[in-house]
Amino acid sequence: MTETFETTVPARPSRWTGTWPANAAWIVVGALTGFGLLVGGTAITGGTWQDAVAEDPTTAVGVAALCYLAAAATGIRWTAWLVALLASVVPVASELLDTPRWIAFALVGLVLTGIGLARGRRATWPQAAAMAGFFGVATAALFLEPRIGLALAGLALAAHAGWDVVHYRRDVVVNRSLALWCIGLDLTMGGICVVLAL
């Protein structure tokens, strides 16, 4: 079962994860990042973090899914961190092209899936399916009444933390530090969005 999740580059022991203080630190950094992204994303539109809309957690789900998919498609764990840093290009490009963000994320996901399948990376299938599931639910939330949409997109993001836990425990596809960071981000931003929608 785990072989469909594995990449060709095996994990090396890391001093950055594995102890409870290190793991907790990654989760806290992820939580701060999640809150920071929520504050920054809403500030761009002239609001505060309490003015979050479904597009905010949907964007985070898209980034998270692309991180895992990129690592699976390339077979190189650290590419997930690279995608996490470069993911701001997708929303910016979608704005410049006057295209909805969800379309841009879906297109990048399709390209990464094609690359992974062309390279024979078995881990691509589960990551593509996860992106379709998590990002599909979050995208559907964009078309609902705003409060319901915010709650559903927030739940999709928070649920992605379960995917992070699976990858952390199995130590597959992405670096454990990214999985821990993503747990903090997903639960914080997703949870806040759900609470704001109530």
Image: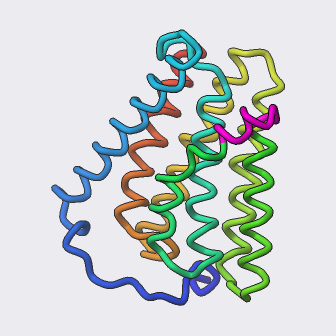
Q: Is residue 58 left or right of residue 181?
A: right
Q: Is residue 76 left or right of residue 16?
A: right
Q: How is the image coloured?
A: rainbow
- The picture places residue 149, in percent across and down from the top left corner, at 72, 24
Asked if 14 appears above or below 21 in the picture, the reply is below
Asked if 171 appears above or below 48 in the picture, the reply is below
Q: Quadrant of the N terminus?
A: bottom right
**Image quadrant in which you'd find residue 127:** bottom right
Residue 178 on the magenta segment: no
Which residues are the magenta region? Answer: 91-101
> Predominant secondary structure in magenta?
helix
Q: Is residue 172 left or right of residue 63?
A: left
**Image quadrant in which you'd find residue 130:** bottom right
| Residue sitting at the far front | 96
- The picture places residue 124, in percent across and down from the top left corner, at 69, 75
At a point 43% along the width and 49% down the height, the residue shown is 183
Residue 99 on the magenta segment: yes
At a point 45% along the width and 61% down the height, the residue shown is 81
Front-most of residues 169 and 58: 58
- The picture places residue 198, in percent across and down from the top left corner, at 58, 13
**Image quadrant in which you'd find residue 91:** top right
At a point 53% along the width and 58% down the height, the residue shown is 83
Asked if 27 appears above or below 70 in the picture, the reply is above
- The picture places residue 15, in percent across and down from the top left corner, at 19, 73
At a point 48% along the width and 68% down the height, the residue shown is 167
